[in-house]
Amino acid sequence: MNLQGIANQPCPAPNLAPAPDFEGLIEAAGDLIYTLDLEGRFTFFNQAVERVLGYTPSELLGEPFVRILTPESAQVASRHYGQGLAGKENTPFFEVEARRRDGTIVYLEVRAGSLIREGVLVGRQGIARDINELKSLQSAVADKLQRMTLLEERTRIAMSMYTRIAALIYEDPGQGLAGDEALREVQSTITRVTAEKHGLTAFDLKLLGMLAKGLSNEEIAREACRSPHTIKDHMKRIMLRLGAKRRAEAVACALRLGLLDFEP
Protein backbone atom coordinates (compact mmCIF):
# COMPACT_ATOMS: atom_id res chain seq x y z
CA MET A 1 0.00 0.00 0.00
CA ASN A 2 1.37 3.38 -0.99
CA LEU A 3 0.90 5.36 2.23
CA GLN A 4 2.82 8.29 0.84
CA GLY A 5 0.36 8.60 -2.03
CA ILE A 6 -2.57 8.46 0.36
CA ALA A 7 -1.02 11.13 2.55
CA ASN A 8 -0.68 13.45 -0.43
CA GLN A 9 -4.36 13.17 -1.33
CA PRO A 10 -6.29 16.46 -0.68
CA CYS A 11 -8.64 16.36 2.30
CA PRO A 12 -12.33 16.70 1.42
CA ALA A 13 -13.90 20.01 2.48
CA PRO A 14 -15.94 19.73 5.67
CA ASN A 15 -19.73 19.81 5.27
CA LEU A 16 -20.31 23.29 6.69
CA ALA A 17 -23.76 24.82 7.15
CA PRO A 18 -24.40 27.93 5.08
CA ALA A 19 -23.72 31.22 6.84
CA PRO A 20 -26.87 32.86 8.23
CA ASP A 21 -28.39 35.60 6.12
CA PHE A 22 -28.45 38.35 8.74
CA GLU A 23 -29.64 40.97 6.27
CA GLY A 24 -32.58 38.76 5.32
CA LEU A 25 -33.42 38.14 8.98
CA ILE A 26 -33.40 41.88 9.73
CA GLU A 27 -35.67 42.70 6.81
CA ALA A 28 -38.05 39.85 7.66
CA ALA A 29 -38.33 40.88 11.32
CA GLY A 30 -41.77 42.05 12.44
CA ASP A 31 -40.28 44.57 14.84
CA LEU A 32 -38.81 47.89 13.76
CA ILE A 33 -34.98 47.82 13.72
CA TYR A 34 -33.04 51.09 13.46
CA THR A 35 -29.64 52.73 13.93
CA LEU A 36 -28.70 56.29 14.91
CA ASP A 37 -25.54 58.28 14.44
CA LEU A 38 -23.83 60.31 17.18
CA GLU A 39 -26.12 63.26 16.41
CA GLY A 40 -29.27 61.21 16.99
CA ARG A 41 -30.19 60.97 13.31
CA PHE A 42 -31.57 57.82 11.73
CA THR A 43 -29.06 55.97 9.55
CA PHE A 44 -30.95 52.71 8.96
CA PHE A 45 -34.45 51.22 9.10
CA ASN A 46 -35.70 47.79 8.17
CA GLN A 47 -38.90 47.47 6.15
CA ALA A 48 -41.03 47.09 9.31
CA VAL A 49 -40.98 50.89 9.62
CA GLU A 50 -43.67 51.03 6.94
CA ARG A 51 -46.01 48.75 8.90
CA VAL A 52 -45.30 50.28 12.31
CA LEU A 53 -45.02 53.99 11.45
CA GLY A 54 -46.34 54.28 7.90
CA TYR A 55 -43.10 55.79 6.55
CA THR A 56 -40.72 54.35 4.00
CA PRO A 57 -37.13 54.07 5.27
CA SER A 58 -35.94 56.81 2.88
CA GLU A 59 -38.44 59.30 4.35
CA LEU A 60 -36.83 59.13 7.80
CA LEU A 61 -33.14 58.56 7.03
CA GLY A 62 -31.12 61.56 8.20
CA GLU A 63 -33.97 62.82 10.40
CA PRO A 64 -33.54 63.23 14.19
CA PHE A 65 -35.36 60.53 16.16
CA VAL A 66 -37.31 63.14 18.16
CA ARG A 67 -39.22 64.02 14.99
CA ILE A 68 -41.46 60.96 15.24
CA LEU A 69 -42.05 61.18 19.02
CA THR A 70 -44.53 63.08 21.14
CA PRO A 71 -42.91 65.89 23.22
CA GLU A 72 -42.98 63.88 26.46
CA SER A 73 -41.61 60.75 24.78
CA ALA A 74 -38.91 62.81 23.03
CA GLN A 75 -37.61 63.79 26.48
CA VAL A 76 -37.64 60.17 27.66
CA ALA A 77 -35.86 58.89 24.54
CA SER A 78 -33.33 61.75 24.57
CA ARG A 79 -32.42 60.97 28.17
CA HIS A 80 -31.86 57.29 27.33
CA TYR A 81 -29.89 58.26 24.21
CA GLY A 82 -27.57 60.58 26.18
CA GLN A 83 -27.08 58.03 28.96
CA GLY A 84 -26.28 55.37 26.37
CA LEU A 85 -23.61 57.45 24.67
CA ALA A 86 -22.08 58.27 28.05
CA GLY A 87 -22.10 54.60 29.10
CA LYS A 88 -24.42 55.35 32.03
CA GLU A 89 -27.55 53.60 30.82
CA ASN A 90 -29.59 52.09 33.67
CA THR A 91 -31.81 49.85 31.53
CA PRO A 92 -31.95 49.14 27.81
CA PHE A 93 -35.77 49.11 27.84
CA PHE A 94 -38.10 52.09 27.69
CA GLU A 95 -41.50 52.95 26.23
CA VAL A 96 -42.38 55.86 23.95
CA GLU A 97 -45.35 57.26 22.05
CA ALA A 98 -44.56 57.72 18.36
CA ARG A 99 -46.59 59.55 15.73
CA ARG A 100 -47.39 57.57 12.62
CA ARG A 101 -47.34 59.22 9.23
CA ASP A 102 -51.15 59.65 9.43
CA GLY A 103 -50.86 61.40 12.82
CA THR A 104 -52.13 58.54 14.98
CA ILE A 105 -50.22 57.44 18.04
CA VAL A 106 -48.47 54.08 18.36
CA TYR A 107 -46.94 52.82 21.61
CA LEU A 108 -43.47 51.33 21.21
CA GLU A 109 -41.37 49.27 23.58
CA VAL A 110 -37.73 50.00 22.71
CA ARG A 111 -34.60 48.03 23.52
CA ALA A 112 -31.54 50.11 22.66
CA GLY A 113 -27.78 49.55 22.77
CA SER A 114 -24.49 51.02 21.61
CA LEU A 115 -23.45 50.70 17.98
CA ILE A 116 -19.75 49.77 17.87
CA ARG A 117 -17.63 49.47 14.73
CA GLU A 118 -14.00 48.33 14.97
CA GLY A 119 -14.01 49.12 18.67
CA VAL A 120 -15.30 52.68 18.20
CA LEU A 121 -18.69 54.00 19.34
CA VAL A 122 -20.45 55.31 16.22
CA GLY A 123 -24.02 55.64 17.45
CA ARG A 124 -26.95 53.73 18.86
CA GLN A 125 -29.09 50.86 17.61
CA GLY A 126 -32.36 49.42 18.76
CA ILE A 127 -35.47 47.34 18.24
CA ALA A 128 -38.90 48.90 18.68
CA ARG A 129 -41.96 46.70 19.19
CA ASP A 130 -45.54 47.84 18.59
CA ILE A 131 -47.39 47.32 21.91
CA ASN A 132 -50.67 49.06 21.01
CA GLU A 133 -52.69 45.87 21.55
CA LEU A 134 -51.02 45.28 24.92
CA LYS A 135 -51.79 48.86 25.99
CA SER A 136 -55.43 48.46 24.93
CA LEU A 137 -55.68 45.24 26.95
CA GLN A 138 -54.11 46.87 29.99
CA SER A 139 -56.53 49.78 29.69
CA ALA A 140 -59.52 47.44 29.44
CA VAL A 141 -58.39 45.50 32.52
CA ALA A 142 -57.84 48.74 34.46
CA ASP A 143 -61.32 50.01 33.49
CA LYS A 144 -62.91 46.73 34.58
CA LEU A 145 -61.10 46.79 37.91
CA GLN A 146 -62.20 50.39 38.44
CA ARG A 147 -65.83 49.48 37.71
CA MET A 148 -65.64 46.49 40.05
CA THR A 149 -64.19 48.69 42.80
CA LEU A 150 -66.98 51.23 42.28
CA LEU A 151 -69.68 48.56 42.42
CA GLU A 152 -68.18 47.07 45.57
CA GLU A 153 -68.15 50.51 47.17
CA ARG A 154 -71.78 51.08 46.19
CA THR A 155 -72.69 47.71 47.68
CA ARG A 156 -70.90 48.58 50.92
CA ILE A 157 -72.69 51.93 51.14
CA ALA A 158 -76.07 50.35 50.41
CA MET A 159 -75.52 47.67 53.05
CA SER A 160 -74.54 50.35 55.56
CA MET A 161 -77.70 52.32 54.77
CA TYR A 162 -79.84 49.20 55.08
CA THR A 163 -78.35 48.33 58.45
CA ARG A 164 -78.85 51.88 59.75
CA ILE A 165 -82.46 52.13 58.55
CA ALA A 166 -83.27 48.72 59.99
CA ALA A 167 -81.83 49.80 63.35
CA LEU A 168 -83.91 53.00 63.34
CA ILE A 169 -87.10 51.11 62.52
CA TYR A 170 -86.57 48.54 65.24
CA GLU A 171 -85.81 51.34 67.69
CA ASP A 172 -89.07 53.14 66.75
CA PRO A 173 -91.75 50.63 65.73
CA GLY A 174 -94.20 53.51 65.34
CA GLN A 175 -92.95 54.18 61.83
CA GLY A 176 -95.12 51.31 60.58
CA LEU A 177 -95.67 51.09 56.82
CA ALA A 178 -93.31 53.99 56.10
CA GLY A 179 -90.49 52.06 57.70
CA ASP A 180 -91.34 48.90 55.74
CA GLU A 181 -91.35 50.89 52.51
CA ALA A 182 -87.92 52.33 53.33
CA LEU A 183 -86.59 48.86 53.95
CA ARG A 184 -88.00 47.60 50.65
CA GLU A 185 -86.47 50.54 48.79
CA VAL A 186 -83.03 49.96 50.28
CA GLN A 187 -83.29 46.21 49.65
CA SER A 188 -84.16 46.97 46.03
CA THR A 189 -81.07 49.19 45.74
CA ILE A 190 -78.84 46.48 47.17
CA THR A 191 -80.31 43.90 44.78
CA ARG A 192 -79.79 46.19 41.78
CA VAL A 193 -76.17 46.97 42.70
CA THR A 194 -75.40 43.28 43.33
CA ALA A 195 -76.96 42.36 39.98
CA GLU A 196 -74.89 45.01 38.17
CA LYS A 197 -71.77 43.68 39.83
CA HIS A 198 -72.45 40.27 38.26
CA GLY A 199 -73.48 41.70 34.88
CA LEU A 200 -77.20 40.97 35.33
CA THR A 201 -80.05 43.20 34.15
CA ALA A 202 -83.50 43.77 35.64
CA PHE A 203 -84.89 41.41 32.99
CA ASP A 204 -82.36 38.76 34.05
CA LEU A 205 -83.62 39.07 37.65
CA LYS A 206 -87.19 38.66 36.43
CA LEU A 207 -86.22 35.48 34.62
CA LEU A 208 -84.38 34.21 37.70
CA GLY A 209 -87.52 34.75 39.75
CA MET A 210 -89.58 32.65 37.35
CA LEU A 211 -86.84 30.03 37.22
CA ALA A 212 -86.92 29.84 41.03
CA LYS A 213 -90.65 29.09 40.83
CA GLY A 214 -89.84 26.00 38.77
CA LEU A 215 -91.09 27.29 35.43
CA SER A 216 -89.75 25.71 32.26
CA ASN A 217 -88.21 27.75 29.44
CA GLU A 218 -91.46 27.48 27.48
CA GLU A 219 -93.51 28.70 30.45
CA ILE A 220 -91.05 31.54 31.09
CA ALA A 221 -91.22 32.49 27.41
CA ARG A 222 -95.02 32.84 27.63
CA GLU A 223 -94.82 34.85 30.85
CA ALA A 224 -92.08 37.14 29.49
CA CYS A 225 -93.60 37.42 25.98
CA ARG A 226 -90.40 36.15 24.38
CA SER A 227 -89.58 33.21 22.16
CA PRO A 228 -88.32 30.00 23.83
CA HIS A 229 -85.09 30.37 21.84
CA THR A 230 -84.53 33.88 23.27
CA ILE A 231 -85.21 32.67 26.80
CA LYS A 232 -82.80 29.77 26.33
CA ASP A 233 -80.05 32.19 25.27
CA HIS A 234 -80.80 34.47 28.25
CA MET A 235 -80.64 31.52 30.63
CA LYS A 236 -77.26 30.46 29.26
CA ARG A 237 -75.92 33.98 29.79
CA ILE A 238 -77.34 34.19 33.32
CA MET A 239 -75.80 30.85 34.29
CA LEU A 240 -72.48 31.92 32.81
CA ARG A 241 -72.51 35.17 34.81
CA LEU A 242 -73.35 33.29 38.01
CA GLY A 243 -70.82 30.53 37.34
CA ALA A 244 -73.58 27.90 37.44
CA LYS A 245 -73.76 24.72 35.37
CA ARG A 246 -77.34 23.74 36.25
CA ARG A 247 -80.59 25.66 36.68
CA ALA A 248 -80.94 24.69 40.34
CA GLU A 249 -77.38 25.86 40.95
CA ALA A 250 -78.20 29.24 39.36
CA VAL A 251 -81.20 29.64 41.67
CA ALA A 252 -79.13 28.71 44.73
CA CYS A 253 -76.44 31.21 43.74
CA ALA A 254 -79.06 33.94 43.22
CA LEU A 255 -80.53 33.28 46.67
CA ARG A 256 -77.09 33.37 48.25
CA LEU A 257 -76.36 36.74 46.61
CA GLY A 258 -79.69 38.17 47.75
CA LEU A 259 -81.02 38.49 44.19
CA LEU A 260 -84.21 36.63 45.12
CA ASP A 261 -86.27 37.75 48.10
CA PHE A 262 -88.27 34.56 48.43
CA GLU A 263 -87.74 30.84 48.74
CA PRO A 264 -88.59 28.83 45.58
Image (cartoon, rainbow, N blue to C red):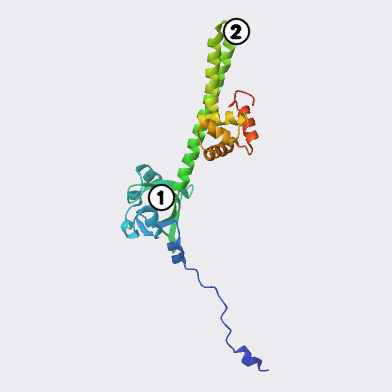
Q: Indicate which disc, 1 or 2, sits on the residue closer to the N terminus.
A: 1
Q: CA distance from mark 1 to mark 2?
A: 71 Å
Instruction: Please give the residue where the numbered disc 2 appears in the rendered image.
Output: 171
Q: Say the numbered circle drawn on residue 126.
A: none
| Nearer to me, 12 or 159 | 159
Instruction: Give the side of residue 59 with respect to residue 133, left or right.
Output: left
Residue 77 position, x and y percent, is 40, 47
Q: Residue 140: tell me if it is visible.
A: yes
Q: Which SS class for mark 1?
A: helix
Residue 228 position, x and y percent, is 54, 38
For marks 1 and 2, give the one nearer the viewer: 2
Q: Residue furthest bottom?
A: 1
Instruction: Please give the residue where the numbered disc 1 appears in the rendered image.
Output: 81
Q: Residues within 10 Å of mark 1 (few under 14, many from 20)?
A: many
- State which quadrant residue 242 falls in: top right
Quadrant occupied by the N terminus: bottom right
Q: Which SS class for mark 2?
A: helix
Q: Amino acid at mark 1?
A: Tyr
| Nearer to me, 50 or 255 | 255
Q: Residue 149: tell me if it is visible.
A: no
- State which quadrant residue 136 falls in: top left
Instruction: Give the side of residue 250 with respect to residue 144, left or right.
Output: right
Residue in the picture at 57% in, 33% down: 219
Q: Is residue 67 above or below residue 258?
A: below
Q: Is residue 210 above or below residue 126?
A: above
Q: Amino acid at mark 2?
A: Glu
Residue 222 position, x and y percent, is 54, 33
- State which quadrant residue 165 falls in: top right
Quadrant occupied by the C terminus: top right
| Nearer to me, 32 or 233 | 233
